[in-house]
Amino acid sequence: MRLGEVELYIVSDGYFWMDGGANYGLVPRVLWEQVTPPDELNRILMGLNCLLVRSAGHTILIDTGYGDKLADKRRQLLSLQREPGLPGALEPLGVKPEDIDIVICTHLHADHCGGNTTLSGGVPRPTYPRAEYWVQRLEWAEALFPNERTRATYLPENLRPLEPALRLIDGDTRVTPHVRCVVTRGHTRAHQSVIIESAGEVAIYLGDLAPMRVHLERLAWIAANDVEPLETLETKRSLRRFALEKRALLIFEHDPVTPAGRLVEVGDDVMVEPVHL
């Protein structure tokens, strides 16, 4: 898809199954199961929707999914389906791993940055060998020094091999004339989303600020694993106003049915109108 002078492509690292309660927090199952029916283990299907951006001579990848390093037990627990995986999904676009020059990490949870590295001779190495990896400085610090709540998702093998190629940024930062990172605090303290603007058109890669369309339609629907849920609430409120004003294209990282859409007002409600890229 073209957005002004920019090219956008949703590229998938696959699908996995996650506990529905984790995705919806305080929302009762009797409500959320009408939106995303669970399986017999109370799990719901989640997408791993990454984004390839071509802007101002740069080839940019936003988030990298789980990647290929998970142990068999963990893979089975998630029922992770990766064929062909993110590098394979890039091939039909004529993009090889060495063609990526910037990887933007919305945050460093394993399902968003596991594909940053891959095993080579049993050693994790950067999957995209020529890329700079852009990460918020505070997010990097919290990933290196996790607590009891976060240590299961901040994994050293996804982080340490990146150090020679790491670009730490502080707050809202422009990447190219069309692409900028903006801190969208709540899921983590330094979670960032990515805004793409060109020729009067706007797209927003939301990351885990709103992992599925319903999280932006209903402000109070917030995942249980958000570290600052009240910050998430206010961040979503502000971004939703911006998206409505700009008629922004929204990209939902974990929505397996509606990876992209635009907000529309329907009476007193706000709904996402799906867009097929």
Image: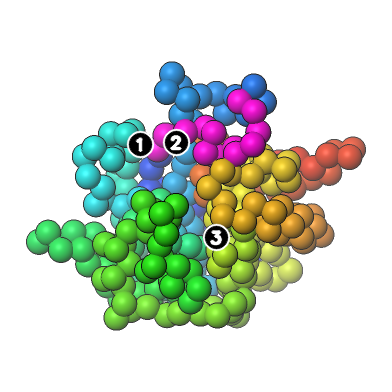
Residue 78: assigned label: 1
Magenta stretch encompasses residue 19 = yes
Residue 146 showing in the rendered view: yes
Q: Is residue 109 above or below residue 79?
A: below
Residue 8 position within the rendered picture, expressed as x and y whole percent measured from the top left: 53, 60
Q: Which residue is mark 3?
A: 188
Instruction: Judge the density around disc 2: few (<14), some (14-19), many (≥20) Cα neighbours within 10 Å.
Output: many
Residue 98 showing in the rendered view: no
Give amino acid for label 3: Thr
Give amino acid for label 2: Met
Instruction: Judge the density around disc 3: few (<14), some (14-19), many (≥20) Cα neighbours within 10 Å.
Output: many
Q: Helix or strand or loop: what does disc 1 sit on?
A: helix
Range of the magenta residues?
16-29
Q: Which mark is nearer the camera, 3 or 2?
A: 3
Asked if the residues shown at circle 2 and circle 1 are in contact, with their CB atoms under 8 angstroms apart, the answer is: yes
| Relative depth, front residue between 128 and 138 | 138
Residue 223 position within the rendered picture, expressed as x and y whole percent measured from the top left: 58, 44
Q: Helix or strand or loop: what does disc 3 sit on?
A: loop
Q: Is residue 16 above or below residue 246?
A: above
How far apart are the two marked residues, 2 and 1, measured between alpha carbons?
6 Å
Count how many numbered circles sit on residues in the image: 3
Q: Which residue is mark 2?
A: 18
Quadrant housing the N terminus: bottom right
Q: Which mark is nearer the camera, 3 or 1?
A: 3
Asked if the residues shown at circle 3 and circle 2 are in contact, with their CB atoms under 8 angstroms apart, the answer is: no
Residue 145 position within the rendered picture, expressed as x and y whole percent measured from the top left: 39, 67
**Which mark is first along the chain, 2 or 3?**
2
How far apart are the two marked residues, 3 and 2, measured between alpha carbons?
19 Å
Left or right of 111? Residue 32 is right
